[in-house]
Image: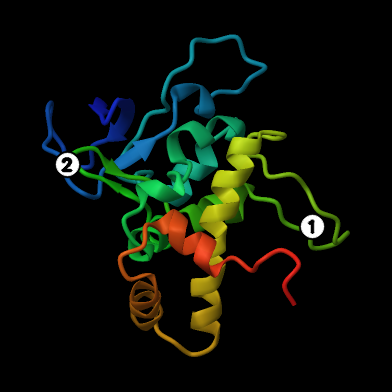
Amino acid sequence: VSIAHDGKTHTALRLLPGPSPPYTPFDMVLPEPAAFCDPTNMTVDRYPAFTSRNCNWTSVFAMIKQPALLWKAWRPESLGSYPNVRLLWQAWDEGALIEGVGRKPPLRLVDEEWGSQKHWKTLKGRLPSWRPHQNASVRQTWSQFQFFVKRVEQALANGSTASEALQDFESQRGDQSMPKFHKFLQPRKGAK
């Protein structure tokens, strides 16, 4: 189902049966159909057949043939679009909810599957296949998003629960916007 929301068109896989099923917050936001098609095959781009067995992120990921097309549908929002650290963390850990449309996959799962990681045998890195390369805007969006993800993960590693860590960040943030809070937490260049 194609749905327009905030000037963007999203495709959602409705999880309830029927010819026009109602929205649920568990409906899955999908990338464009070309992401599921083999680029060497000259057939028309179309979505694969979805059944009750493959309506989960693991199965959807297994059907993706062109991860470079995922950024447009699943990218994190710009830092200023998040009203707080909790919703940014939710996009990473559970998947961002687009009200009236559905839920994107957790970005941690997307990045585990197609992010830049070292090969377990060679220990050599690889470029992230789902994020556009040599694009300053993409790099900045991802870097600022990861800035907060890494800080929450560090708090979790130090023994805090996610709820405690997020509450602590919100207390520190006060009434600052997320970009101002990022600037406040960012180490000053040249400072030791």
* Above or below: residue 108 compared with residue 72: below
Classify residue 1 as left or right of residue 53: left
At a point 44% along the width and 34% down the height, the residue shown is 73
Classify residue 135 as left or right of residue 95: right
Q: Quadrant of residue 190?
A: bottom right
Residue under circle 2?
A: 16
Circle 2: element type: loop
Q: Quadrant of the N terminus?
A: top left
* Above or below: residue 116 compared with residue 35: below
Categorize mark 2 by other alpha carbons within 10 Å: few (<14), some (14-19), many (20+).
Answer: some
Outermost residue, right side: 122
At a point 35% along the width and 51% down the height, the residue shown is 96
At a point 57% along the width and 49% down the height, the residue shown is 142
Classify residue 142 as left or right of residue 162: right
Circle 1: element type: loop
Q: Is residue 64 visible?
A: yes
At a point 49% along the width and 90% down the height, the residue shown is 159
Nearest to N terminus: mark 1 or mark 2: 2
Which mark is on residue 119? 1
User: Residue 10, position in %: x, y?
Assistant: 32, 29
User: Residue 5, position in %: x, y?
Assistant: 25, 30
Measure the C-alpha gap from mark 1 to mark 2: 39 Å
Q: Quadrant of the C terminus?
A: bottom right
Q: Quadrant of residue 83?
A: bottom left
Q: Amino acid at mark 2?
A: Leu
* Above or below: residue 20 compared with residue 141: above
Q: Amino acid at mark 1?
A: His
Q: Is residue 1 visible?
A: no
Categorize mark 1 by other alpha carbons within 10 Å: few (<14), some (14-19), many (20+).
Answer: few
Instruction: Name the colouring of the figure.
Output: rainbow
Q: Nearer the viewer, mark 1 or mark 2?
A: 1
